[in-house]
Amino acid sequence: MTETKKLHVALFPWLAFGHTIPYLKVAKHIAQKGHKISFISTPRNIQRLPKIPPNLSSKIHFISLPLPQVDNLPPDAEATMDIPTNKIPYLKIAYDGLKEPLFQFLKTSAPDWIIYDFAAYWLPPITSDLGISSAFFSIFSAWTMAFLASSSSAMINGDDERTRPEDFTVPPKWVPFPSKVAYRIHEAKRAFEHFEVNDSGLSDMYRLGTVCAVDVLAVRAASS
């Protein structure tokens, strides 16, 4: 019997522990299958992660990329938990500054796959050029993804008739079946912020729409 090929899989989550921990769970699951993992984040965030079980420690390698310093971001801030909400766009600017060191790592290590998060809008062209298969692992639920936009191009181009938070308190027109799933008005006001360009220079919806151009789109199960 031919032995199954062992893969090298890189993971690159957004700098929030609500994202990093689910990504680490995925890393452990893949490592249990015998594959090599490169888990990429910043030094302080890696230090704050739970310890890897001994049986997986030889399979999971942490790749530490120093976060660039940017204006309006405290020097020791490497995750959303380190800053108030109004500072998060500056964390995204710093995250975008990881583009070149991440490119160099991918070029040198040549993983078979990279699994990445919503914020890395600049990563799809890199993986394409390097011939690395890519996957977007969404920590958002399937219904959230479906509710936010009708397609990735709509996210990128801002093609949405919904122009007020109130428009998000009813199911979107593209849902082809009866549904009561919608935001309450206070939830809608928060969701609406993701459609607006923030101080990072982009909207979160633009980032999300761009990273959907992948070989695989995976959505976290509601129970996880």
Image: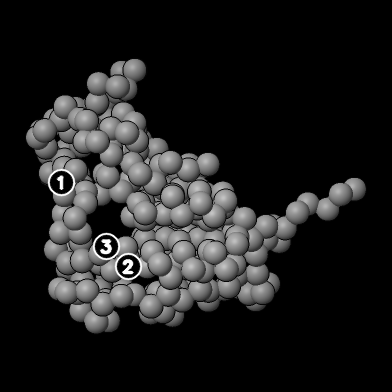
Looking at the image, do the residues carrying marks 2 and 1 touch, with CB atoms under 8 Å apart?
Answer: no
Give the distance between the C-alpha atoms of the residues marked 3 and 2, in whole angstroms.
9 Å
* Residue closest to the far front: 129
Locate residue 179, reporting x and y percent: 29, 23
The residue located at (31%, 18%) in the rendering is 178
The residue located at (20%, 59%) in the rendering is 200
- Say what amino acid the circle numbered 3 marks: Lys
Q: Which mark is in front, 3 or 2?
A: 2
Residue 223 seen:
no
- Of the pair 16 and 38, the residue shown nearer to us: 38
- Of the pair 203 and 103, the residue shown nearer to us: 103
- Quick check: 127 above or below 191? below
Q: Secondary structure at mark 2?
A: loop
Q: Find residue 112 and report its image quarter.
A: bottom right
Q: Is disc 1 surrounded by few (<14), some (14 to 19) or many (20+) residues within 10 Å?
A: some
Q: Which residue is mark 1?
A: 196
The residue located at (21%, 51%) in the rendering is 202
Q: Which residue is mark 3?
A: 92
Q: Earlier in the sequence, mark 1 or mark 3?
A: 3
Locate residue 167, reporting x and y percent: 13, 30
The residue located at (50%, 48%) in the rendering is 128
- Say what amino acid the circle numbered 2 marks: Gly
Locate residue 100, reporting x and y percent: 40, 67
Which mark is on residue 150?
Answer: none
Locate residue 156, reporting x and y percent: 28, 39
- Quick check: 177 above or below 148? above
Give the distance between the C-alpha atoms of the residues marked 2 and 1, in whole angstroms.
21 Å
Q: Earlier in the sequence, mark 3 or mark 2?
A: 3
Q: Is disc 3 surrounded by few (<14), some (14 to 19) or many (20+) residues within 10 Å?
A: many
Q: Which residue is mark 2?
A: 97
Q: On the picture, is 216 further left or further right than 120?
A: right
